[in-house]
Amino acid sequence: MRWRAAGVELAFSTAADGDQRDEALRAAWLGRAGCPPGCLVPVQVHGIRIADPAAGDPLDGADGLVAPRPGPPLGVFGADCPGLALIAPDALGLAHCGWRGTAAGIVPALVAALARRSRHSPAQWTAFIGPGISGARYEVDAPVLTARAWPAPALAPGAPGRAWLDLPAAIAHDCSAAGLTRIERCGVCTAGDPRLRSRRRDGAGMVGMLAAWAG
């Protein structure tokens, strides 16, 4: 799967590309996708730390990355959790936005990290939300619902004590609240597309990856 946003190429692996945590499978897929060598990938922990490798930050324990543009390709893993790319004219950021990270503030954390890298304001950036589980397929319970004040458009009533959470909508809301005006959603649901890996549909196992690089 491929997209282009604000001069940046974005690609998302399919289940046929294999578990992207495997370095050999990841290198093979990135090559097929046309991604330049040297893709940086954080060692994700469902947190909100954003690494800046060019500044010497370690990749361990990060769920997002920022880099100058032009610079190295960036990638994040996901098997229902959307990836978010923030694209500035002179910098690029990418983050893994599961419900835990989104609840804890990974979107504003990525915005703050990219603002330290970029000379341009968020109003001049573009946000791109990659494949992730859609609200129609993601019913959640109290631990998720009480983790933050979720934006009303991201919730729909579910079974008693539960609701359907549109995580991409919550991510878009947080981007808008941070001052971004150009927000693109790919609209691909990992749980609804048989080509993709979904933890909610398939159980634990392989993960896909969203990669981004300057075109």
Image (spheres, rainbow, N blue to C red):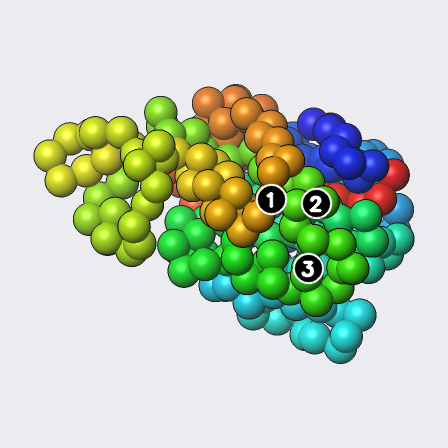
Q: Which label number is shown at residue 57?
A: none
Query: Residue at point 46% right, 23% down?
Result: 192
The amino acid type, in three-letter code, at marker 2 is Trp
Residue 6 placed where, x, y %? 78, 36
Say which residue label 3 marks.
114
For the residues bearing labels 2 and 1, Cβ distance under 8 angstroms: yes
Q: Which label number is shown at residue 180?
A: 1
Tell me if mark 2 has few (under 14), some (14-19) or many (20+) residues whose alpha carbon lies within 10 angstroms of its own.
many
Of the two numbered discs 2 and 1 on the same chain, state the one appearing first in sequence.
2
Secondary structure at badge 1 equals loop
Asked if one can make out residue 26 in the rendered structure from this viewpoint, the answer is: no
Q: Given the current orientation, which residue lies at the most extreme bottom position?
A: 56
Query: Residue at point 22% right, 44% down?
Result: 141
Tell whether 212 sits left or right of 155: right
For the residues bearing labels 1 and 3, Cβ distance under 8 angstroms: no
Secondary structure at badge 3 equals helix
Say which residue label 2 marks.
125
Of the two numbered discs 1 and 3 on the same chain, state the one appearing first in sequence.
3
Of the two numbered discs 2 and 3 on the same chain, state the one appearing first in sequence.
3
Tell whether 91 sits left or right of 79: right
For the residues bearing labels 2 and 3, Cβ distance under 8 angstroms: yes
Query: Residue at point 51% right, 63% down?
Result: 48
Tell me if mark 3 has few (under 14), some (14-19) or many (20+) residues whose alpha carbon lies within 10 angstroms of its own.
many
Q: CA distance from mark 1 to mark 3?
A: 12 Å
Point out the image quarter for the C terminus: top right
The amino acid type, in three-letter code, at marker 3 is Leu
In front here: 193 or 146? 146
Secondary structure at badge 2 equals loop
The amino acid type, in three-letter code, at marker 1 is Leu
Residue 76 placed where, x, y %? 63, 51
Point out the image quarter for the N terminus: top right
Mark closer to the observer (2, 3): 2
